[in-house]
Image (spheres, helix red, strand yellow):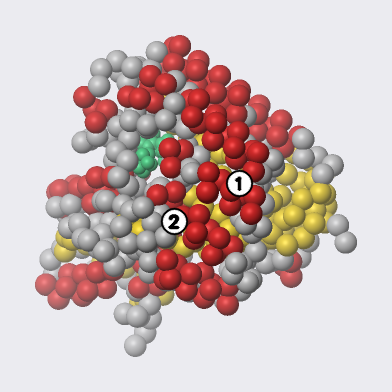
Amino acid sequence: MATKKLFIRTFGCQMNVHDSEQLEELLKEPGYARTESAKDADLIIVNTCSIRDKAEQKVYSQLGRYRHLKKTNPHLQIGVCGCVAQQQGERLLEKAPFLDLVIGTHNLDRLPECIARARQTGRPVVETGFRKAVPSIGIPTLPAKHTVSAFITIMQGCDNYCAFCVVPYLRGREESRKFEDILAEARALAARGVKEVTLLGQNVNSYGISPGGGRSFAELLRAIGGIGGIERVRFTTSHPKDLSDDIVACFRDVKTLCESIHLPVQSGSDAVLARMNRRYTSADYLDRVRKLREASPEIAISSDIIVGFPGEAEQDYQKTLDLMEKVRFDTLFSFQYSERPGTAAVGLDGKVSPEEKRRRLIELQALQDRHTQEKHDRLVGRTVEVLVDGKSRNTPRDVTGRTRSNKIVNFAGGGELIGKTVRVRIVEAFLHSLRGEMLG
Ligand code: 5AD
Ligand code: SF4
């Protein structure tokens, strides 16, 4: 049987990127192989994100572009997976009647069966029920040969209900994957030659506290840290309220755990943090940062910040800038607050105007750019370890990789370096990357 072609377009976070990898793995059995061109595809899957309104709108405009491909290829099937599918369900068919599949976040494992059902009946299939013991947590993926870095899902869902966030409604309750299954996947990846793993979950720090895991996240980090061949371990995302001393200690004790953490703060104002239902204060956050730096002095800290949450007054916003000055993040993802249907923040007053949100965001990003550049400048002249992950896109004579602190470094070198860890002296610092020279 000729191979059928699968085109996947992914929106959103690393969780979604990995969900797409898992879908690709699942669809190998019924004979699909991935293509980079939507025009050639027998099946187009749009894996969607609805964290902010903009993300959701992008999904709709993209779907509009695929619609006309059905005219030239009447066998083409088009499916929507992920958060927008979960949120909209049947309603998506009103907006996009040409869809064949709408598959929510708990039903990815059913995709092969749904594709066949849609084909047989000639009618769209919608699957958006929530399930316990979600079988699609962590479908082991076998990455292509020479893959340097891979993701491993360790938990899914979120029980935190931050007032701005749709994730708990769309990804369901927290559920941890079995300890042994995670270790088995990490060992299989190491055997395949993977050098770096990133453990994924909406709130990895509560791994094991949520049903399913049985052992703590710190225990998991120590176990993964002991697997031969895995040179680097990372994880994302962490909730500051759950970053225990035990986890912090791993940054000192687990040698393969990289000096880098993503620790979303969201705001520097205690009043705003309380309204966001984050359950920590700015002092708690600074205390976690202090402990992290005690355990691992070189640790790079990145964060997420929202500006213009309802009720954020100028003085609250100034407190966020103060916190940024105190912490000096390595990198920051910052967003204008975007109201999401069904979340607690919908009912809050004190809406901030779009112009004001924009002003705050631009100013805050300028401050962060100064901090990022200063951090990068300080690395000039220093020697760092770089795990090479590929050829540079722009300059074919260069390779690109990352430091343990997750900074991008480009330097002259050939493809044989891919997958190797080399020592590189930093010679130039830019805002988004560093330039280096490999040492012999
Ligand atoms: N508006 C703006 N940003 C949001 N985020 C989550 N929900 C919203 C929202 N409604 C941001 C948070 C989170 C990141 C993944 O996206 O900062 O940490
Ligand atoms: Fe959303 Fe908060 Fe859960 Fe993160 S911790 S996914 S921001 S509800």
Please, what is the three-letter code of the amino acid marked with disc 1?
Ser
**Mark 1 or mark 2, earlier in chain:** 2
The number of callouts visible is 2
Classify 412 as above or below 328: below
Q: Is residue 180 visible?
A: yes
Residue name at image x 65 percent, y 39 percent:
294
The residue under label 1 is 260
In front: label 1 or label 2? 2
Of residue 437 and residue 311, the one placed in the foreground of this image is 311
Labels 1 & 2 near each other (Cβ < 8 A): no
**Residue 289 in the image: x percent, y percent?**
57, 34
**Outermost residue toward the bottom in this view:** 1
Label annotation for residue 216: 2
Of residue 249 and residue 233, the one placed in the foreground of this image is 249
Question: Judging from the image, what secondary structure is the residue with disc 2 in?
Answer: loop
Residue name at image x 15 percent, y 48 percent:
91
Ligand 1 falls in quadrant: top left
Please, what is the three-letter code of the amino acid marked with disc 2?
Ser
**Residue 64 in the image: x percent, y percent?**
29, 50
Of residue 359 and residue 311, the one placed in the foreground of this image is 311
Residue name at image x 82 percent, y 44 percent:
382
Measure the alpha-carbon separation of dots 1 and 2: 20 Å
Tell me the quadrant of the picture where the C terminus can be found. Answer: bottom right
